[in-house]
Image (cartoon, grey):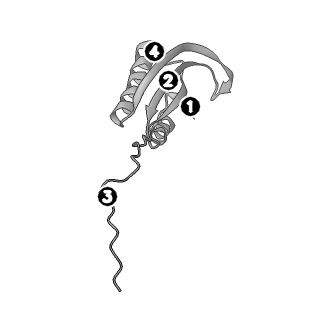
Amino acid sequence: MLMPLLCLPAEPLVQREEVSDLRKYEVLYIMRPDIPEEKYKEYVEKYNTLIQENGGEVLNVDIWGKRRLAYEIEKVREGYYILLQMQCDTALPKELERNFKISEEVIRYLITRIGE
């Protein structure tokens, strides 16, 4: 005896929303104080461009200016603080971190994912 074939619809019954893997991050980095003001703004633009070229979006940039460090780093007591918020995929923070590590201008950085 033959069993009847079960006909399934071509479209799935439950429509799934496309899940976006874009996440929000907050990045704080400190640059050397001996850089001229015009030059450090060029570096800020350089990192913002790096984010945009890799598919990210810079949401907010807050330049705190020159401030005293909590402790001495490489015989430096002050630094330019830059805080930015970005939205990107999960690979971009690793690329940004790689660029911070090879840069001689950045003395400290912290990349944190902002929760939902």
Circle 4: element type: loop
Q: Nearer the viewer, residue 113 or 44?
A: 113
Sort mark 4 into few (<14), some (14-19) or many (20+) by Cα contacts within 10 Å: few
Circle 1: element type: loop
Q: Amino acid at mark 3?
A: Pro
Q: Nearer the viewer, residue 87 or 100?
A: 87
In whole angstroms, how far apart are the C-alphas of marks 3 and 1? Answer: 41 Å
Q: Nearer the viewer, mark 4 or mark 1?
A: 1
Residue plotted at (39% across, 43% down):
18
- Residue picked out by circle 3: 9
Circle 3: element type: loop
Circle 2: element type: strand
Q: Quadrant of the C terminus?
A: top right
Q: Position of residue 12 (x, y in %)?
A: 36, 53
- Residue picked out by circle 4: 36
- Residue picked out by circle 2: 84
Q: Amino acid at mark 2?
A: Leu
Q: Position of residue 17 (x, y in %)?
A: 40, 42
Q: Position of residue 55 (x, y in %)?
A: 36, 36
Q: Amino acid at mark 4?
A: Pro
- N-term-proximal mark, 3 vs 4: 3
Res 46 → quadrant: top left
- N-term-proximal mark, 3 vs 1: 3
